[in-house]
Image (cartoon, grey):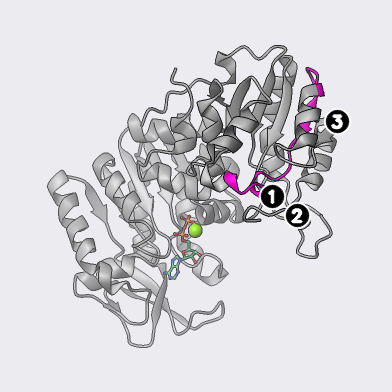
C-alpha cells in the first residue's frame, strides 16, 4: 500500500466547503446524561479543524458514534460533541438534525468560511456501514473537498470513510498523516534494526501481525498470553495458561520461518505464574515450559525482562503491540512496565499500536516518552498486518 498521501497542506481549501471525517466516537456516561467521559478524541481533531478554518474553509464535520445500526438513537446523538467542540474552539458549532437530510443540506448550503457544522451520527444512516454510493454521493454533494482524519475508522470501507472519496478530491488531516508517517514509515523504510515486540492475549488475533512483521523485522519478541502456545508447541508444560491448541503448529511454523529468514525470535525463558486469574492470586516465578498443574502464566519473568530490555537497547525502531502480561492486575504488570520503561530510554523510534497496548503505556505513565502512540486500535492492527486500509487507499497519492 502507498502511504504517501496528499494532506490538507497539498490542497487549496480557501473559500471551499470541506467535508471532514473525524473520529468523535467518544465514551459517554452510561446514565444517558449526555456527559462525555473522555474528550481526548475531540481534542485530537483540533489541529486539523483549526488549520482548515485558518485557511478560510467552511468545515462540515462528521463522525460515527457507537453502533446505532442505521437507526436514529437519541442517546448516540453527536449533540454533546458539538457542545464540547464549541467549548474547545471557542466558537459556536452548528448542529444538523440529520446526516444528509433537509436540515443538513440547508445548514451546509448556508455555511460560511470560518464556520463549522457538525452532521448527525453517520451511522444513523443505514447506508453508512454498507458504503452505499447514494449516501456517499449525498454527503459529497454538500462539499467540495473531503478531508479524512478519522484514523480509528480507516480500516472500514464505509460511506463516510471511503465512499465519499469517489466524488471529491480526498486528502488526509494531520492525525492520519502522523499515523502514515510513523507506522507507514516503520513498515516501509524502518531505521534498523527493527525490533517488533508482540504480546497480548491470543496468537489467533495476532497471526496477521506476526506474519507481516516476520517479513520486515530484524528481531521479534514474543510475550503475553500467546507465548504459552509457542511454549506448548515446543513440548513445554503450560498448566492452566492461555493456550490455543489449534495454533501450536502455526507457532512451530513461525519459529522455523524466523530461522529461515534470519530473523531473531525471542521467546520467554521464565514466567510469573499464579494459582488463579485474580489480582491477589498467589504467584511464583518458574522456568518457561515448566508451569505446574493448576497454575497459569500471567506475566513474563525477571530473566525474560532482562533479555527483552537488552534487545531494544540498540534498536533503530521498535514496534510494540500487545502487553507482556495481565497488566490490568498490578502484581502482573511488571513485565509490561519494564518493557515500557526500556522503550522510554532507548534512542530508537518507538511506536505503540493496539488499543490495550496504548492503554497500558498510558496507565503506566510512559505515554509522553514514546515517539508515536497510535490512536486507532483495530486500524493500527490492520496497518501492522500490512493490509490495505480503505480509508487511506481512497486518498489522493502525493
Ligand atoms: P492490543 O489491544 O494492544 O492489540 P490485545 O488485545 O492483543 O492487545 O491483548 C491485551 C490483553 O492481553 C490484555 O487485556 C491482557 O490482560 C491480556 N494478556 C496479556 N498477557 C496475558 C496472559 N499471560 N494471560 C492472559 N491474558 C493476557
Ligand atoms: Mg485489544
Q: Position of residue 311 (x, y in %)?
A: 33, 48
Residue that numbered label 1 is attached to:
26
User: Residue 93: x percent and y percent?
Assistant: 83, 33
Which image quarter is the N terminus in?
top left
Name the secondary structure under disc 1: loop
Give the mark nearer the N terminus: 2 vs 3. 2
Looking at the rendered image, the disc whose residue lies closer to the viewer, 2 or 1, is 1
**Marks 2 & 1, CB-CB < 8 Å contact:** yes
Q: Please tell me whether residue 328 is drawn above or below residue 154 in the rendered image.
A: below
Give left or right: position of 263 versus 351: left
Which secondary structure, mark 3? Answer: loop
The vertical placement of 69 against 98, above or below, is: below
Residue 194 coordinates in the image, percent (x, y): 32, 39
Q: Nearer the viewer, residue 177 or 116?
A: 116
- Give me the residue at 82% from left, 22% from top: 110
Give the residues in magenta. Answer: 110-127
User: Vertically, is 239 above or below 71?
Assistant: below
| Residue carrying label 3 | 90
The quarter holding residue 82 reads: top right
Is 384 a magenta residue? no
Q: Is residue 118 visible?
A: yes
Q: Residues within 10 Å of mark 1 (few under 14, many from 20)?
A: some
The label number, if any, that marks residue 37 in the structure image: 2
Q: Is tag 3's residue or tag 1's residue first in the polypeptide sequence? A: 1
- At label 3, counting other C-alpha atoms closer than 10 Å, the crowd grade (few under 14, some 14-19, many 20 or more) is few
Quadrant including the C terminus:
top left
In magenta stretch: residue 123: yes
The quarter of the displayed image where residue 34 is located: bottom right
Q: Nearer the viewer, residue 378 or 260?
A: 378
Instruction: Please report whichever mark, 2 or 1, sits nearer to the chain's N-terminal start.
Output: 1
Left-right relation of 114 to 163: right
Amino acid at each position: 500500500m502507498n502511504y504517501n498521501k496528499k494532506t490538507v497542506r497539498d490542497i487549496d481549501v480557501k473559500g471551499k466547503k470541506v467535508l471532514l471525517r473525524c473520529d468523535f466516537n467518544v465514551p459517554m456516561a452510561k446514565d444517558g446524561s449526555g456527559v462525555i467521559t473522555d474528550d481526548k478524541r475531540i481534542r485530537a481533531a483540533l489541529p486539523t479543524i483549526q488549520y482548515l478554518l485558518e485557511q478560510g474553509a467552511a468545515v462540515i464535520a462528521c463522525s460515527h458514534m457507537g453502533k446505532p445500526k442505521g437507526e436514529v438513537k437519541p442517546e448516540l446523538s453527536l449533540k454533546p460533541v458539538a457542545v464540547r467542540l464549541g467549548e474547545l474552539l471557542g466558537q459556536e458549532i452548528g448542529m444538523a438534525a440529520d446526516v444528509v437530510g433537509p436540515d443538513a443540506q440547508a445548514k451546509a448550503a448556508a455555511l460560511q468560511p470560518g464556520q463549522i457544522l457538525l452532521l448527525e451520527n453517520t451511522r444513523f444512516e443505514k447506508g453508512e456501514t454498507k458504503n452505499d454510493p447514494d449516501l456517499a454521493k449525498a454527503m459529497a454533494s454538500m462539499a467540495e473537498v473531503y478531508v479524512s482524519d478519522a484514523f480509528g475508522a480507516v480500516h472500514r470501507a464505509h460511506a463516510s470513510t471511503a465512499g465519499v472519496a469517489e466524488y471529491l478530491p480526498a486528502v488526509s488531516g494531520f492525525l492520519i498523516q502522523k499515523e502514515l508517517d510513523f507506522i507507514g514509515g516503520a513498515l516501509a523504510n524502518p531505521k534498523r534494526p527493527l525490533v517488533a515486540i508482540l504480546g497480548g492475549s491470543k496468537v489467533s488475533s495476532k497471526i496477521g501481525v506476526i506474519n507481516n512483521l516476520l517479513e520486515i523485522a530484524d528481531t521479534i519478541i514474543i510475550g503475553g498470553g500467546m507465548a504459552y502456545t509457542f511454549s506448548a508447541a515446543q513440548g513445554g508444560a503450560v498448566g492452566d495458561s492461555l493456550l490455543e491448541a489449534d495454533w501450536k503448529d502455526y507457532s512451530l511454523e513461525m519459529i522455523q520461518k524466523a530461522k529461515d529468514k534470519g530473523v531473531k525470535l525471542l521467546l520467554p525463558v521464565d514466567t510469573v505464574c499464579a494459582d488463579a486469574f485474580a489480582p491477589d492470586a498467589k504467584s511464583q516465578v518458574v522456568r518457561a515450559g515448566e508451569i505446574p498443574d493448576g497454575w497459569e502464566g500471567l506475566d513474563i519473568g525477571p530473566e525474560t525482562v532482562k533479555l527483552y530490555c537488552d534487545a531494544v537497547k540498540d534498536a533503530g525502531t521498535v514496534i510494540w503491540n500487545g502487553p507482556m502480561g495481565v497488566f490490568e492486575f498490578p502484581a502482573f504488570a511488571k513485565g509490561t512496565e519494564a518493557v515500557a520503561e526500556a522503550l522510554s530510554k532507548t534512542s530508537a523510534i518507538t511506536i505503540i499500536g493496539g488499543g490495550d497496548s496504548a492503554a497500558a503505556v498510558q496507565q503506566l505513565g510512559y505515554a509522553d516518552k514514546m515517539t508515536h502512540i497510535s490512536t486507532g486500535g483495530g486500524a493500527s492492527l490492520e496497518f501492522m498486518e500490512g493490509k490495505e486500509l480503505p480509508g487511506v487507499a481512497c486518498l489522493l497519492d502525493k
